[in-house]
Image: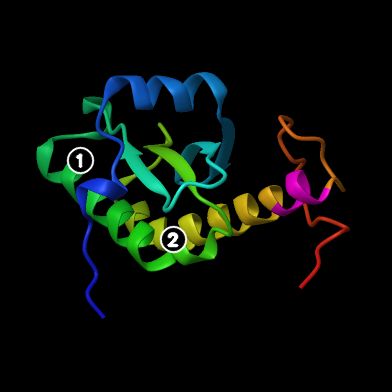
């Protein structure tokens, strides 16, 4: 299996980032913070990253980005529908927390998949509202 990160899987234009920031849901799973905008009917999910200089020098910022891209490639299938995702790193994250990115991304992807299931089935949280923390009562396998 070839794991790559093609241009079609990226958010590249400032307007695309702006759409996600203005209309997306916010989700935090340490050390990641995600903004997610559901795109029903789109062929694939797309990833954008905003890793600022406050996270450290270029080497550390690139390490974060590599880890996030790898987690996206490995776990994008966990999303039940297409999403535009903008991922940032929590301000209090440390360099050693890079190792937790894959686990955090998978947890976030599962949360978004549950949210998409609720908004399309008409049950649970109304569309447009963020889910509350904790396990959901209406999970269906």
Q: Is residue 110 magenta?
A: no
Image location (x, y in percent) of residue 121: 81, 51
Image location (x, y in percent) of residue 138: 87, 59
Which residue was labeled with disc 2? Answer: 76
In the displayed structure image, the side of residue 59 where residue 2 appears, left or right: right
Residue at the image position 60 percent from the left and 59 percent from the top: 110
Which residue was labeled with disc 1? Answer: 61
- Of 74 and 54, the residue lying toward us: 74
Residue at the image position 41 percent from the left and 53 percent from the top: 44
Image location (x, y in percent) of residue 78: 53, 64
In the displayed structure image, the side of residue 87 where residue 129 appears, left or right: right
- Of 67 and 4, the residue lying toward us: 4
Image location (x, y in percent) of residue 8: 27, 47
| Mark 2: few/some/many CA within 10 Å (<14, 14-19, 20+) | many
Please give the range of residues in magenta. Answer: 117-121
Q: Earlier in the sequence, mark 1 or mark 2?
A: 1
Instruction: Quadrant for residue 135, please give it.
Output: bottom right
Does residue 102 lie above or below 52 as drawn? Answer: below
């Amino acid at each position: 299996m070839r794991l790559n990160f093609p241009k079609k899987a990226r958010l590249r234009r400032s307007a695309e980032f702006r759409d996600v920031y203005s209309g997306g849901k916010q989700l935090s799973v340490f050390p990641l913070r995600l903004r997610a905008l559901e795109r029903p009917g789109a062929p694939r999910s797309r990833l954008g990253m905003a890793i600022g200089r406050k996270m450290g020098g270029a080497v550390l910022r690139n390490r974060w980005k590599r880890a996030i891209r790898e987690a996206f490639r490995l776990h994008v299938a966990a999303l039940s529908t297409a999403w535009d995702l903008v991922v940032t790193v929590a301000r209090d994250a440390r360099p050693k927390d890079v190792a937790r990115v894959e686990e955090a991304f998978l947890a976030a992807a599962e949360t978004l998949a549950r949210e998409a299931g609720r908004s399309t089935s008409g049950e649970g949280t109304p569309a447009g509202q963020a889910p509350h923390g904790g396990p959901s009562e209406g999970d269906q396998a």
